[in-house]
């Protein structure tokens, strides 16, 4: 869609690499220019410039400081199917000169991906036990996200213990 028609119809132009990679039911929610390209927010996650989609369930947190959107991605280790032990990745900082709806859209979608949230205290800190929706899939994934400094063995035992109590799929 050309820039004129996109503006007329209220649609943001999206880089071809993102448009070509969108899932059938994935919709563009907001976009913003960043120094090295365009940040695209969809119903399934965030597309950083030149990168792959970061799903809502793969984001530990997102903050907005009136200049930059800071997104903390996670890496997940599968304990058993449907249960993951998370580790926070290096925060990604996106400087937005004209943020539009991007900060609000990101915050809402990260929050909406969380169905339940419980806190567990562990040696050296604690962990959040989350049930989250995964875009494009039915059901929930259970995630254990330990705080920095939490005993990694205790966090793993917590995740394994929770996984052992979950009913098996039929």
Image (spheres, rainbow, N blue to C red):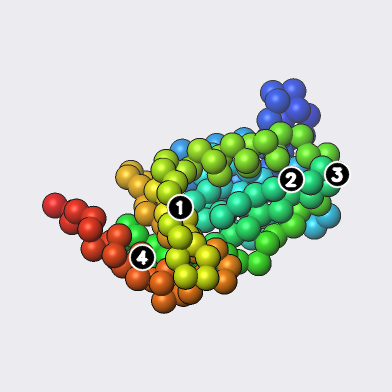
Q: Are marks 2 and 3 in contact (CB under 8 Å)?
A: no
Give the label on residue 97, or none.
Answer: 3
Under circle 3, the secondary element is loop
Residue 137 locus on image (x, y percent): 37, 46
Indicate which label's residue lies in the foreground, 2 or 3.
2
Determine the image quadrant of residue 53. Answer: bottom right
Residue 90 locus on image (x, y percent): 66, 67
Mark 1 = which residue?
Answer: 119
Quadrant (top left, top right, bottom left, bottom right) of the N terminus: top right
Indicate which label's residue lies in the foreground, 2 or 4.
4
Determine the image quadrant of residue 59. Answer: bottom right
Residue 63 locus on image (x, y percent): 69, 48
Give the label on residue 64, or none.
Answer: 2
Residue 146 higher or lower than 102, as above or below: below
Determine the image quadrant of residue 142. Answer: bottom left
Q: CA distance from mark 4 to mark 1?
A: 12 Å
Residue in front for this viewpoint, 112 or 158: 158
Residue in front for this viewpoint, 100 or 73: 73
Q: Earlier in the sequence, mark 2 or mark 4?
A: 2
Indicate which label's residue lies in the foreground, 2 or 1.
1
Q: Earlier in the sequence, mark 2 or mark 1?
A: 2
Q: CA distance from mark 2 to mark 1?
A: 24 Å
Please tell me which residue is depicted at 36% across the width and 65% down the height of the picture.
158
Please tell me which residue is depicted at 66% across the width and 54% down the height of the picture.
71
Give the label on residue 158, or none.
Answer: 4
Q: CA distance from mark 4 to mark 3?
A: 42 Å
Please tell me which residue is depicted at 49% across the width and 62% down the height of the picture.
126
The extreme left residue here reads 170
Q: Are marks 4 and 3 in contact (CB under 8 Å)?
A: no
Q: CA distance from mark 3 to mark 1?
A: 36 Å
Please indicate whether residue 112 sits to the left or right of residue 61 in the image: left
């Amino acid at each position: 869609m050309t820039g004129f028609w996109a503006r007329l119809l209220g649609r943001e132009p999206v880089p071809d690499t993102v448009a070509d990679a969108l899932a059938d039911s994935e919709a563009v929610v907001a976009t913003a220019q960043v120094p090295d390209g365009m940040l695209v927010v969809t119903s399934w996650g965030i597309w950083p410039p030149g990168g792959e989609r970061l799903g809502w369930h793969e984001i530990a947190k997102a903050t907005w400081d009136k200049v930059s959107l800071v997104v903390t991605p996670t890496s997940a280790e599968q304990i058993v199917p449907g249960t993951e032990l998370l580790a926070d990745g290096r925060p990604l900082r996106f400087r937005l000169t004209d943020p539009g709806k991007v900060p609000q859209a990101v915050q809402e979608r990260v929050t909406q991906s969380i169905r339940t949230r419980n806190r567990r205290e562990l040696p050296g800190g604690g962990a959040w036990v989350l049930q989250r929706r995964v875009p494009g899939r039915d059901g929930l994934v259970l995630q254990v996200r330990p705080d920095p400094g939490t005993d990694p063995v205790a966090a793993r035992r917590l995740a394994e213990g929770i996984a052992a109590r979950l009913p098996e799929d039929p």
